[in-house]
Image: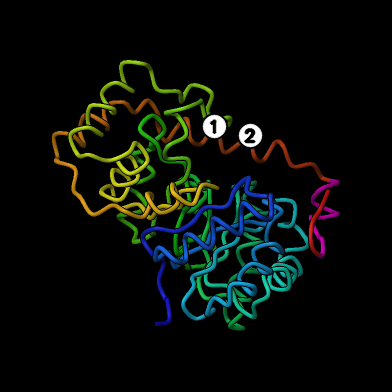
Amino acid sequence: MTVENLPNVGLGTWLLTDFNELKHAIQAAWETGYQHIDTAQVYNNEYDIGVILKDLAIDRSELFLTTKIAPMNYKKHTKTSVHQSLQRLGTDYLDLVLLHAELNKTLNLSAYQALLELQKEGIIRHVGVSNFSIAGIQDLVEATGVKPYCNQIVCSPTTRSAELEAFCLSEGILLTGYSILKPYFTPNPFYPDSALTDAEKAKLDTLCKKYDVGIGQLLNKWALQHHYHIIPKSSNPKRVKENYQLDFDIAASDMSIIDEMNRYSAAEYREDVKKWENNVTEEQLENGLLYEQHFK
């Protein structure tokens, strides 16, 4: 069955750069029923994913494949980098390509327009963004008249930008949430205040017992019930399978318990977005991130 729209649950691959771990994760995901793999040019594993998909003889038409444009490719190298991603992934089209981060208005628009042109050529089926603020999305839509297919953003009990979420959903822009489970164990490195307190963890543990699920299952289901698509990442095949087993519903009162842990806002999100812009140098924008298999 051809997969045309973004599946609710996909396999995230950030930091999965060990070939064998990645292969075991993808194999477990495929056997479990996943039909979405999410990667990015900066993850440095597109080539490995392409090799693994070929080795496992996974039918391309049954897989939704997402990658993201490295911010340093926005200025001059967006189209070239997409063609390189296609080569690395061993495919002639991509289901979804995202701008990986919001930079300044000019760079965002240049890269977005390039992706829309590739979409018209049939190389890309859907064009979206990641880590974009409300203002960043509005600028793209005002200039092109085309809404992004989705916005992939951080989403956890402590880092849920409710205003941004509401805006995207009201505009018909799909949401993909990442790092959903991260604050339960350690602070998200991009959001140092995101760690859950011991009291908050205890509340979550109580809910896990109530629903007879693991913490990953609980928080993944919480995100799904907030209308997010999710891309949980694990190198453990057992966890990969558990992350897909979400056949239960969280009561509204228990959703509220988790929601009350949030300490994030759209304004803070916009400030975090600026960090991406400040970390990309003019030299990087000139040179881009271009490579055949892996970069060092």
**How far from the left and from the top, in percent, is residue 39?**
59, 57
Left or right side of 129 for 5: left
State the image quarter where residue 287 is shown: bottom right
Q: To which quarter of the image does residue 157 belong?
A: top left
Q: Residue at 49% across / 73% down in the picture?
A: 63
Judging depth in this view, the residue of 262 and 49 nearest the camera is 49
Residue at mark 2: 275
Q: Which residue is drawn at 64% across and 63% down?
A: 49
Quadrant of the image for the N terminus? bottom left
Which amino acid type corresponds to the residue marked 1 in the rendered image?
Glu
* Label 1 neighbour load within 10 Å: few <14, some 14-19, many 20+: few
- Residue 143's x, y, as percent? 54, 62
Residue 281, above or below 39: above
Residue 288 belongs to magenta span: yes
* Amino acid type, callout 2: Lys
Q: Which of 5/164 is in front?
A: 5
Asked if 124 appears above or below 17 in the picture, the reply is below
Q: Label 2 crowding class (10 Å Cα cut-off): few <14, some 14-19, many 20+?
A: some
Question: In this figure, which residue is indicated by the disc labeled 1?
Answer: 271
Q: Are marks 1 and 2 in contact (CB under 8 Å)?
A: yes
Q: Distance between the residues labelled 1 and 2?
A: 7 Å
Closer to the camera in the image, 255 or 198: 198
Left or right of residue 79, residue 159 in this image: left
Q: Which mark is residue 296?
A: none
Which region of the structure is painted magenta? 283-292
Residue drawn 23% across and 27% down?
A: 206
